[in-house]
Image: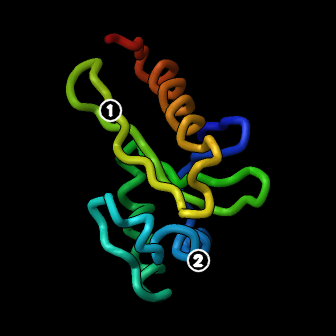
Amino acid sequence: MIETDDLILDKAVFEDWRGIYQNVWSRPESARYMLWKVTESESEARIRIRKTMEFQKNHDTYLVYEKKSGEPIGFAGVEKLSDHVYQEAGICLGPEYVGRGFGKQILSGLIGYCRRTYNFSESQ
């Protein structure tokens, strides 16, 4: 789990399917620049959350939850490129949550996670 002032990044649980579907996966605005397609139904969302949970078992990817509401509002993660080289693996927020400084908090949280977990140091 990664915590910021307003957010928690944590592994998905099945019950998150509805919130992430409503806030992100069903939203064309969220998928526009991403490498995934809009989820078109609740049954597809339940399948997708199971796939997400399985993927997260072996990857540093997380759902993003707004602390205030507890709602899943996006997803983010980091991936290893090579020894001591990591990059963000995509950050996606629902349209209602863009422009509120959450992206900066997510990046800061991921950098802190890499520092703690992988003895990460920033380079130019």
Determine the CA span between mark 1 and mark 2: 29 Å
Image quadrant containing the C terminus: top left
Q: Residue at x 32, y 59 (%)?
A: 34
* Quadrant of res 36: bottom left
Camera-nearest residue between 104 and 63: 104
Mark 1 packing: few (<14 Cα in 10 Å), some, or many (20+)? some
Amino acid type at mark 1: Gln
Camera-nearest residue between 92 and 45: 92
User: For mark 1, what is the residue?
Assistant: 87
Q: Secondary structure at mark 1?
A: strand
Disc on the earlier residue, 1 or 2: 2
Q: Residue at x 59, y 77 (%)?
A: 18
Q: Say above or below: 95 vs 61.
A: below
Residue situated furthest front in the rendering:
99
As drawn, the label of residue 18 is 2
* Quadrant of res 20: bottom right
Q: Say above or below: 22 vs 88.
A: below
Q: Is residue 14 visible?
A: no
